[in-house]
């Protein structure tokens, strides 16, 4: 099991869906805007310190808790029910985890828990568990 917290002043809320497209010579060309490139670089830089020596093999359970800075009228630990959606946050984050070498492909994430909270301590809590197929057979 790998478990860590990525402290941040501000969590990037740019999502993977914010890629842009231009058409040149009748062909679409996709690119990442600067804000998305910066978010990717920040995640990869912070994640790099926690990469396992060998890529995880087989199914993985990923738990991610997004701890956003407090705003007026909320309490620490209260669920954040405003944008961005957890699935949008997770996509870029898992792509970055793949890029830095946690696993071969984020398709290995067979179980996923993603939560968003308001918090006095801002950052991202991450827990990665490599599953043993024999221990976790549900059929």
Image (cartoon, rainbow, N blue to C red):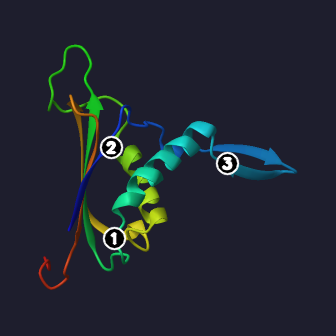
x and y, in percent, of residue 22 in the image: 75, 43
> What distance separates the C-alpha of mark 1 from that of mark 2?
25 Å
> What distance separates the C-alpha of mark 3 from that of mark 2?
23 Å
Q: Residue at left 37%, top 59%?
A: 49
Label 2 environment density (alpha carbons within 10 Å; few <14, some 14–19, many ≥20): some
* Earlier residue among tags 3 and 2: 3
Find numbered disc 3 in the image and state the secondary structure of the residue it sits on.
strand
Label 1 environment density (alpha carbons within 10 Å; few <14, some 14–19, many ≥20): some
Residue located beneath label 2 in the image = 86
**In-front residue for pair 104/51:** 51
Q: Residue at left 46%, top 63%?
A: 100
Residue occupying the far front of the picture: 49
Closer mark to the observer between disc 3 and disc 1: 1
Residue located beneath label 3 in the image = 31
Residue located beneath label 1 in the image = 52
Q: Is residue 20 left or right of residue 59?
A: right
* Earlier residue among tags 3 and 1: 3
**In-front residue for pair 75/8:** 8
- Residue 112 seen in this snapshot: no
x and y, in percent, of residue 116 in the image: 25, 38
x and y, in percent, of residue 44 in the image: 46, 54
Q: Residue at left 38%, top 68%?
A: 102
* Earlier residue among tags 1 and 2: 1
Label 3 environment density (alpha carbons within 10 Å; few <14, some 14–19, many ≥20): few
Rendered-image quadrant of the C terminus: bottom left
């Amino acid at each position: 099991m790998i478990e860590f917290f990525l402290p941040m002043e501000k969590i990037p809320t740019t999502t993977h869906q914010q890629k842009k497209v231009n058409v040149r010579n009748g062909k679409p060309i996709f690119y990442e805007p600067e804000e998305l490139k910066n978010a990717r670089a920040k995640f990869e830089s912070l994640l790099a310190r926690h990469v396992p020596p060998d890529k995880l093999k087989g199914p993985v359970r990923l738990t991610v808790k997004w701890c956003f800075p407090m705003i007026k009228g909320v309490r620490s630990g209260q669920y954040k029910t405003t944008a961005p959606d957890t699935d949008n946050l997770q996509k870029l984050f898992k792509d970055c985890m793949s890029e830095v070498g946690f696993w071969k492909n984020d398709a290995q994430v067979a179980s996923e828990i993603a939560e968003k909270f308001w918090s006095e301590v801002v950052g991202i809590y991450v827990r990665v568990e490599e599953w043993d197929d024999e221990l976790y057979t549900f059929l």
